[in-house]
Image (tube, rainbow, N blue to C red):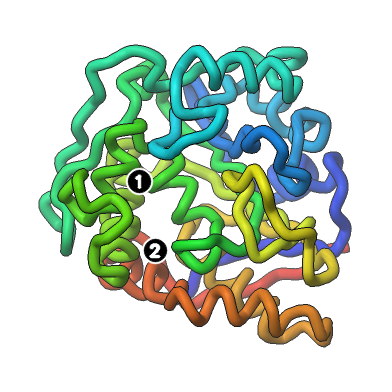
Amino acid sequence: MSATVYFSKTITPQKVLELYQMLGKELSGRVAVKLHSGEKGNQNFLGPDFWKPVIDYVGGTVVECNTAYEGERNTTEKHKKLLEEHGWNKYFTVDLLDAEGPDLKLDYEKGKVIRENYVGKNIVNYDSMLVLSHFKGHPMGGYGGALKQLSIGVASSYGKAYIHGAGVVENIWTADHDSFLESMADAAGSVVDYFKGNIIYVNVMKNMSVDCDCCAVAEDPCINDIGILISTDPIAIDQACIDLVYKCNDPGKAHLLERIESRNGIHTIEAAAALGYGLREYELIEVE
């Protein structure tokens, strides 16, 4: 068995929409659009103009959650101000899922490290989710893609600390590293279960720095843009992105791969596949 991943080397807002329509799956009911709103000062995140066609098409609400570290997104007041500054409110309805407590606890008995996940309580207002991910490196996870968006991205501020700490909030920056990666896989699985698989994933391989969009001071991209991918499988789409980096001829890939490999980034994919909510095997269908 294998998952289907569509891929185009053309990176435009309209191409994102074309690939969504090609996928042949419609998101039902009220659609939450999970994306990264970008930390203040970050130069690499993909802004509202880029995502507008596909968000308009699905009629979705842009959703985000507060962070668990110092910055301009760690309180509701500051995060709402930055969302406005970055232009998200210009085009879209925006919902900060954990703007007010209490968090919603998602039980996940299959979890290897954590068996519960804490997400913004406003998630109950949605029936499906469109996960729009900017694929790039990450200081802790090695890389950021669909699985990170599902886990750290959907988690509340408390939930982010819980995942990072592998179930012990006080260990947010000191937990065993592989246990943190496995916790991300567990948390992502809880969100997949919550939406009963009614999720579509888009990964855009553009502006690929070794640093995440959560970094106020981030390195500039080290590798040329590769393309857009879309799938109904969060594991397959992340695996495909990793494989495309390995296969490309760009000399800058060595820097990005060092970041991924030094943080054992592939282990999140391994752990997620072991939980069974997706496949590492995929058919990559390239379109113009």
Q: Position of residue 22 (x, y in %)?
A: 72, 49
Please tell me in which quadrant of the rendered image residue 182 appears. Answer: bottom left
Say if 23 sits above or below 269 in the image: above
Q: Give the Cα distance between marks 2 and 1.
A: 10 Å
Q: Position of residue 149 (x, y in %)?
A: 49, 47
Q: Position of residue 274 (x, y in %)?
A: 27, 72
Which of the labelled discs sits on residue 192, or is there none? 1
Sequence-wise, the earlier of marks 2 and 1 is 1
Local crowd size for mark 2, using a 10 Å CA cut-off: few (<14), some (14–19), many (≥20): many
Q: What residue sits 80% from the left and 71% below the top?
A: 223
Q: What residue sits 16% from the left and 63% below the top?
A: 112
Q: Amino acid at mark 1?
A: Val
- Residue 123 placement, left or right of 148: left
Please tell me in which quadrant of the rendered image residue 252 appears. Answer: bottom right
Q: Secondary structure at mark 1?
A: helix
Task: Look at the numbered discs 2 and 1 and tell me whether their residues touch, using CB distance below 8 Å.
Answer: yes
From this viewpoint, is residue 21 visible? Answer: no
Q: What residue sits 60% from the left and 53% below the top?
A: 212
Local crowd size for mark 1, using a 10 Å CA cut-off: few (<14), some (14–19), many (≥20): many
Which of the labelled discs sits on residue 278, or is there none? 2
